[in-house]
Image (tube, helix red, strand yellow):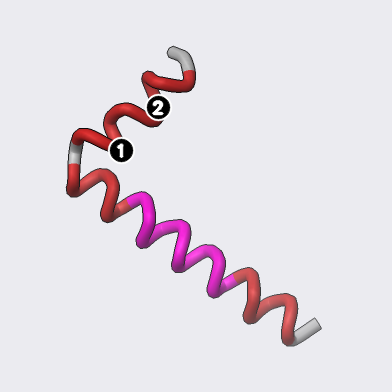
Amino acid sequence: MGFWGVVAPLFLIRTWRYAYYQKLDHDGRKLCLELLWV
């Protein structure tokens, strides 16, 4: 499974793309909050 095997579904399947970016957004916010509280 190469690069396009992972990336292509994100381009082609809208629900997967939304879920992926929501996960990135959530994890990014969580990381920022943790760094602020250190």
**Residue 4 rendering spot, x and y as whole percentages:** 40, 21
Residue at x 27%, y 31% (from the top left corner): 9
- With respect to residue 31, does 14 lie above or below? above
Residue at x 56%, y 72% (from the top left corner): 30
- Disc 1 crowd rating (10 Å Cα; few below 14, some 14-19, many 20+) is some
Task: State the quadrant of the N terminus.
Answer: top left
Q: Residue furthest right?
A: 38
Given contact means CB atoms under 8 Å apart, are the residues at marks 1 and 2 in contact?
Answer: yes
The disc labelled 1 sits on which kind of residue? Answer: Leu
- With respect to residue 36, does 3 lie above or below? above
Identify the mark at residue 2; answer none if there is no mark.
none
Residue behind mark 1? 10
Assign the magenta stretch its main secondary structure.
helix
Residue at x 27%, y 54% (from the top left corner): 18
The disc labelled 2 sits on which kind of residue? Answer: Val
35 in the magenta segment? no
Which SS class for mark 1? helix
Residue behind mark 2? 6
**Residue 19 rendering spot, x and y as whole percentages:** 29, 53
Magenta residue span: 20-30
**Residue 31 rendering spot, x and y as whole percentages:** 63, 69
Task: State the quadrant of the C terminus.
Answer: bottom right
**Residue 28 rendering spot, x and y as whole percentages:** 55, 66
Q: Residue furthest top?
A: 1
In the image: residue 27, left or right of residue 32: left
In the image: residue 8, left or right of residue 25: left
Residue at x 18%, y 46% (from the top left corner): 14
Which SS class for mark 2? helix
23 in the magenta segment? yes
